[in-house]
Image (cartoon, rainbow, N blue to C red):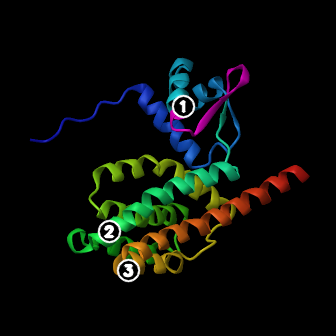
């Protein structure tokens, strides 16, 4: 029997709208959000906007400041480091599990996702981001570890937000295939230590690039 359609409330729709607007960079990191402006933009009442803001605050994409004003969360060195290191913990564990259980788990999801990187390399930001996120999700999903898959998925919005911010400032900074080829080989051929190490080295490189970029942007902003 087919499943019933999911019912979504106006608050759910407003939350989805606000989350996507932040992830897509329509509201810059650190920018002020007002209930009145959001109410006009989304087309819902202020009470619905307020509920959506509280929901997105729980995802750490917005924050409240004194006197009850709202801001998009910053993408500073600390926040970048926290997002990436949490991601490294999830994906490092996934790489280890996959390497240990490769004969049982297989690698077909990882193979397909790596092939998709080549097609996306010359495409627009949406395609590049989707392919990059898809490759990282592929080896987590390949493990079949339900709890790990769900925890990794819960971080996906913040990672996409960070990816899009990086692509906006430094488009096509790294060719997708070249950037992921060593990681792909480790995931599909190497032992557990090497596979986990490859994931952590890959993410450490991203940390260094994006923190340096954030600090450069902050200096430029301070200089006027």
**Which is in the foreground here, disc 3 or disc 1?**
3
- In the figure, residue 115 lies in which quadrant? bottom left
64 inside magenta stretch: yes
Q: Residue at x 53, y 18 (%)?
A: 47
- Which sits in the foreground, 54 or 102? 102
SS at badge 1 = helix
* Figure quadrant of residue 175: bottom right
In the image, what residue occupies the spot 23% across and 35% down?
A: 5
Numbered badge on residue 190: 3
Please tell me whether residue 104 is drawn above or below residue 56 in the rendered image. below
Label for residue 42?
1
Measured Cα–Cα span from mark 3 to mark 2: 10 Å
Q: Badge 2 is on which residue?
A: 98
Q: Is residue 73 above or below residue 145?
A: above
Task: Please tell me whether residue 20 is drawn above or below residue 169 in the rendered image.
Answer: above
SS category of the residue bearing label 3: loop
Magenta stretch: includes residue 67: yes
Mark 1 Cα shell of 10 Å, populated few (<14), some (14-19), many (≥20): some
- Mark 3–mark 2 CB contact (< 8 Å): no
Spatial CA span between label 2 and label 1? 43 Å
Number of dots carrying numbers: 3
Q: Which residues are magenta?
A: 56-69
For the residue pair 119 and 208, the one nearer the viewer reads as 208
For the view shown, which residue lies furthest in the front direction?
Answer: 193
Against 124, residue 34 (above or below) is above
Q: CA distance from mark 3 to mark 1?
A: 49 Å
Q: Secondary structure at mark 2?
A: helix
């Amino acid at each position: 029997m087919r499943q019933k359609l999911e019912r979504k409330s106006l608050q759910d729709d407003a939350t989805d709208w606000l989350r996507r607007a932040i992830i897509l960079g329509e509201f810059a990191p650190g920018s002020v959000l007002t209930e009145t402006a959001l109410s006009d933009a989304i087309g819902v009442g202020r009470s619905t906007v307020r509920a959506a803001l509280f929901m997105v605050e729980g995802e750490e994409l917005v924050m409240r400041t004194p006197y009850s004003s709202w801001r998009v969360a910053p993408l500073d060195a600390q926040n970048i480091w926290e997002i990436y290191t949490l991601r490294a913990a999830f994906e490092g564990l996934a790489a280890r599990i996959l390497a240990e259980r490769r004969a049982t788990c297989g690698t077909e999801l990882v193979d397909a996702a790596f092939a998709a990187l080549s097609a996306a390399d010359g495409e627009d930001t949406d395609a590049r981001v989707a392919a990059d996120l898809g490759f990282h999700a592929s080896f987590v999903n390949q493990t079949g570890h339900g709890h790990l898959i769900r925890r990794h998925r819960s971080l996906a919005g913040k990672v996409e937000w960070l990816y899009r911010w990086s692509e906006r400032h430094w488009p096509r900074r790294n060719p997708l295939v070249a950037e992921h080829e060593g990681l792909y080989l480790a995931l599909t051929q190497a032992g557990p230590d090497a596979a986990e190490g490859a994931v952590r080295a890959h993410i450490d490189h991203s940390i260094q690039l994006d923190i340096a970029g954030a600090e450069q942007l902050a200096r430029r902003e301070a200089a006027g």
